[in-house]
Image (tube, rainbow, N blue to C red):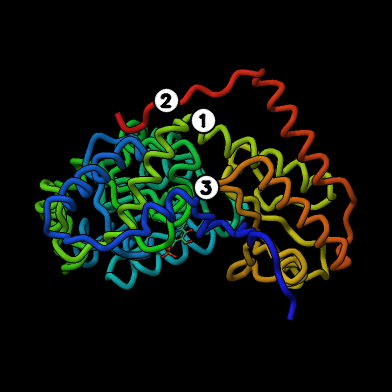
Amino acid sequence: MTIHTGRHFLQIPGPTNVPDRVLRAMDRPVIDHRGPEFARLGAEVLEGLRPVFQTKGPVVIYPASGSGAWEASIVNTFSPGDCVLMFETGHFSNLWRDVAERMGLRVDYVPGNWRRGVAPAEVEARLSADKNHVIQAVMVVHNETSTGVRSRIAEIRQAIDRAKHPALFMVDTISSLASMDYRHDEWGVDVTVAGSQKGLMLPPGLSFNAISEKALAANKTAELPRYYWDWQEMLKPNRQGFFPYTPATNLLWGLREALLMLQEEGLTNVFRRHDRHAEATRTAVRAWGLEVLCEEPKEYSSSLTAVLMPEGHSADRLREVILENFEMSLGTGLAKLAGKVFRIGHLGHFNDLMLAGTLGGVEMGLRLAGVPHKAGGAAAALASLVESHQQAGTKKPVPESVLS
Ligand SMILES: Cc1ncc(COP(=O)(O)O)c(C=O)c1O
């Protein structure tokens, strides 16, 4: 048995490393979820979440993984047989499509090659052709975690507007919220789906729906059966900071601390940090002579990078070697990408030296596993990090309030 020392490097694209501050905030006795202390906690986190989604509207919190928030987005807004437009960006768009179909929706699913995001022109064309407004919603995964490809949400909104189509717009931000720029109100999103275990730096177990007024109106006539996920049942007690059922109390203490950390850093700085780490990671990949899966630079993810293996070499063997020797977990290739790609998570509670360790581990792993590559990727990433510091000057980023 190998004895490991030091910290484990959890560099999968979520769940991510949980900051000690958040762990300590959760390490406390469970309190009465019908009492006054809980009401204060509930009110604080429900309010504090809004700026993270960049919305003035309500955000509901489910004691559930992200899949629960997917189901909630659907059962709250549709009736059986409704038609929705979805796009194949990868494994997670496939799964969200499956949820919609199981709930009895008809899905118009636009095929994709898993290396590109949703094409805004395609959205416009499909909606323009839908003269009778049969399509009830456009549903897009913002950051496809299986591929490291980002879809351009603002441009998709413009495409919907150009088609003058009344469809709802729903976006999965499970691996982009609090890592990549995202604006629920400004981009006219009706339901945003999110989870706790990635940019929010929490353990798995909470998920979210941010809800527009248009989605609330659709909710009034939506006939799909719902109980646990029902927005109305949730929103009523939420007004006093309470939940309709037992909430995940200690995760909410963690959420409160994570929101404070995001507030202290400032969302703009959080996004900039993720952009820098993603850029440095791609620099390393190119220097190794390997290929980033995402084909379009405008669609690079800032929270993870999926790397294609050279022909004949298994990504899972490489991941195994890295885990055994360097105590680092990297993301596996999912579904049709199994064995073909590995994914480097660089999101959440993360900094330059953690990235240096991560890329150092990948480079040593490539060598140990006998994967053909050029040496020097990690060093190239360090140079990229230094250069971005030089460009920013010696000024420290100015924190801005995200909670006020
Ligand atoms: C983009 C995306 N959507 C949905 C999910 C499903 O969330 P969960 O596994 O928390 O149910 C994930 C999980 O990684 C994801 O990355």
As helix, strand or loop, the secondary structure at mark 1 comes to: helix
Q: Pick whichever, 236 or 229, lies toward us.
A: 236
Ligand 1 near label 3 (Cβ, under 8 Å)? no
Q: Residue 47 vs residue 397: left or right?
A: left
Q: Looking at the image, which residue is at 45% across and 30% down? A: 266
Residue linked to disc 1: 269
Amino acid beneath label 2: Glu
Q: Pick whichever, 281 or 322, lies toward us.
A: 322
Q: Pick whichever, 68 or 29, lies toward us.
A: 29
Residue linked to disc 3: 348
Query: Residue 301 — which label?
Result: none
* The C terminus lies in quadrant: top left
Q: Where is residue 100 in the image (x, y as percent from the top left)?
A: 33, 65
Q: Residue 70 vs residue 119: left or right?
A: left
Residue linked to disc 2: 400
Crowding near pointer 1: few (<14 within 10 Å), some, many (20+)? some
- Residue 6 in view, yes or no: yes
Contact check, label 3 and label 2, Cβ < 8 Å: no
Ligand 1, seen in the image, is in the quarter at: bottom left
* The N terminus lies in quadrant: bottom right
Q: Where is residue 121 in the image (x, y as percent from the top left)?
A: 48, 40
In this picture, is 239 found above or below 263?
A: below
Residue 344: quarter of image: bottom right
As helix, strand or loop, the secondary structure at mark 3 comes to: loop
Q: Residue 207 vs residue 267: left or right?
A: left
